[in-house]
Amino acid sequence: MIWSKFVKYLTERQKLSLRNIRSGQEIWHLFVSRLNLMLASLTLVVILFVVILTTVAYTPILDLIPGYPGNRSRQLILENIARLDSMETLVVRWERYNRDIQMVMDGVNVSSLTEDTIIKSSKTSPFPRSVSDSLLRKQIETDSSYMLVRSNPRQRAEVSFSIISPVGGTIVRPFNPKQGMFGVEIAPQPNQAVMAVMDGTVISTGWTTESGNSITIQHAGNMVSIYRRAARILAQTGQRVRSGEAIAITSTQTSERTPLLIFELWNNGNAVDPENYITF
């Protein structure tokens, strides 16, 4: 009995009309029931929900809301995390590779400098390897005049080549191997070209936290020159350079704050005093 009355209450038709307020004449009318109004309202709510959900899911509308991380923002965050991880791996490899090269020139037996290490480091090089570059590398690898040879560190290195100054400036820290200074520190002018001291081939370029931008050049007669703390490297690994050719640039800051350039000269794996052979 109660249920039938409730159903009748919901399905009972009502007249919804619009009348002119002045004349009282009916303009428009509609017969509806309470059940129809409830179903129409529910349908409208469902349609609005679907429209809002579709808009949020398939459009970048959330990016317009300040402080809300939309789909594009989350994608950029993931891409930046991947880039940082790749850069960290690259820096670790280059630091290990440069450290091992330094130990080889010091005459230390480096077990970590394996063929796999060199291959991985070459794959991460930012410079693409061309056909001519590959031929040059093969020529250098087979030419004994470009090989690093260990010798007795007690023997004094003899140099019979004409060596020019890498950069103009004042020496602020001389050669002192006992204090870990295997070259000289030079205070150059800002934005000055750093030149190759002799003809040779660039065997490594890179950046480390201790030395900054560094470049190493192999010369004839087992001579190696190293240039550290450059602002920008101009030469590439495997490139043949001539004496006096610009291979790097010093800092563009003022002379009072210009980072010191470290220049090292090695012969047969032994560090030699550059001031004995170069007039700075």
Image: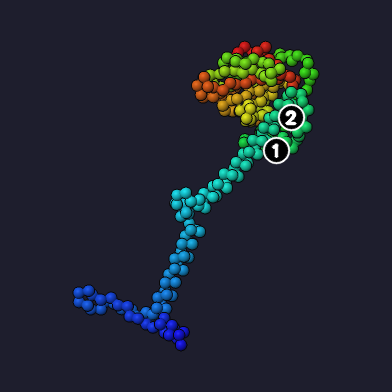
The residue sitting at 73% across, 14% down in the picture is: 158
Q: Position of residue 204 (x, y in %)?
A: 66, 29
Q: Position of residue 70 (x, y in %)?
A: 50, 52
- Can residue 102 be seen from the camera position used here? yes
179, above or below 12, in the image: above
The residue sitting at 23% across, 75% down in the picture is: 20
Q: Position of residue 99 (x, y in %)?
A: 70, 29
Residue position for label 1:
120
Residue position for label 2:
141
Report, in whole angstroms, how far the alpha carbon at label 1 lies from the one at label 2: 18 Å
Residues 118 and 153: in front is 153
Q: Give the farthest residue toward the right.
A: 152
Three-letter amino acid code at disc 2?
A: Glu
The residue sitting at 64% across, 17% down in the picture is: 184
Residue 177 falls in image quadrant:
top right
Dot 1 falls on a residue whose secondary structure is helix
183, above or below 140, in the image: above
Q: Position of residue 23 (x, y in %)?
A: 20, 77
